[in-house]
Image (cartoon, helix red, strand yellow):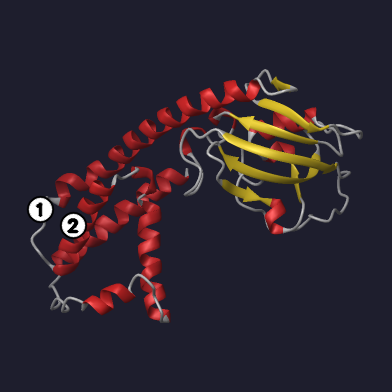
Amino acid sequence: MRMMLACTLCVCFWLMAAGARAAPKTPTPPAPSPATAAASDSPATDEERTLYAIGLVIGRNLTPFSLTPAELATVKAGIDAEVSGAKPAVDLSVYGPKIQPFAVARQHAVAEREEAAGASYLETAAQAPGAIRTPSGAVVQTLVAGTGASPTADDRVTVQYEGRLIDGTVFDSSIARGAPFTTALRGVIPCWTDAVPLMKVGGKSRLVCPAKLAYGERGSGPNIRPGATLVFDIELLDIPAAGAASPAAGMKAPAPPATMPAPK
């Protein structure tokens, strides 16, 4: 699970810090001048960009904690204490083991909020003209009726799609990449497996996928939060025959949803 990986990496940062505390401290470098501090927000050299990337990695691995600005300030205080060699305000051997349970609790809280918002969004989407709700709970709205064949759940399909959060944020798009995408319907999230077979080649549909048919409480990457309801606009271009080459065959799989396996 990506969330667990993120938590593990966060624990690693803390354990490395604990090891550094046991070693002799090197002299603390002088505080940066205001000009240097300002420059750090706009890295200019390769070294500065690499240092900035370290911050991005740390920030990404803090995502499962859903920190408020005040909580982030507390985390920064811990980093500052370790880097400067100041006496820490807490005992890492006591509070380090609490990090992962804390992250899990935060993840559940985020998932509950997202699922509540998603349920409301699903109800509204189900009232749209032409919308139907599948037995599994997805909402499918036909935007353009197709005239070709319909795939089965065991087929491969070639599509153009855009994936959004319910606030409209686009997290993935084959359209933006400039090429259609071919995938096996058994290899994607359950929402696609269930709903795309309701389409016909040449048609375009909007899928609204509850979390249980997408990424559940685990979320996916930095953009899809635990419990998130997802919206996909999908245009079905083709149903490639087994073993047949297609324009998108062999292309690097994009971010979700096209290549992530269904939640276990």
Mark 2 is surrounded, within 10 Å at the Cα level, by few (under 14), some (14 to 19) or many (20 or more) other residues, namely some
Q: Nearer the viewer, residue 83 or 15?
A: 83
Name of the residue lying farthest toward the top: 135
* Residue at which label 2 appears: 77
Q: Secondary structure at mark 1?
A: loop
Q: Determine the residue positioned at 14% across, 64% down.
A: 22
Please give left or right for residue 230 compared with residue 258 in the image: left
Task: Choose between 125 and 192: the one closer to the eye.
Answer: 125
The x, y position of residue 204, in whole percent, is: 78, 37
Task: Please tell me how crowded label 1 is: few (under 14), some (14-19), or many (20+) other residues with Cα within 10 Å.
Answer: few
Mark 1 touching mark 2, by CB under 8 A?
yes
- Looking at the image, residue 254 lies above or below residue 154: below
Give the residue displayed 89% in from the left and 44% down from the top. 241
Q: Quadrant of the C terminus?
A: top right
The residue lying furthest to the bottom in this view is 45
Image coordinates of residue 85 in percent, x first then y, are: 12, 67
Residue type at mark 1 is Ala
Of label 1 and label 2, which has the lower sequence position? 2
Up the image or down, 54 lies above or below 127; here it is below
Q: Which residue is mark 1?
A: 89
At mark 2, the secondary structure is helix
Please name the residue shown 40% across and 67% down the image.
53
Residue 173 appears left or right of 27? right
- Coordinates of residue 147 in the picture (x, y in percent): 91, 33
Left or right of 24 on screen, residue 79: right
Residue in the picture at 39% in, 73% down: 42
Q: Quarter-wise, where is residue 102 in the image? A: top left
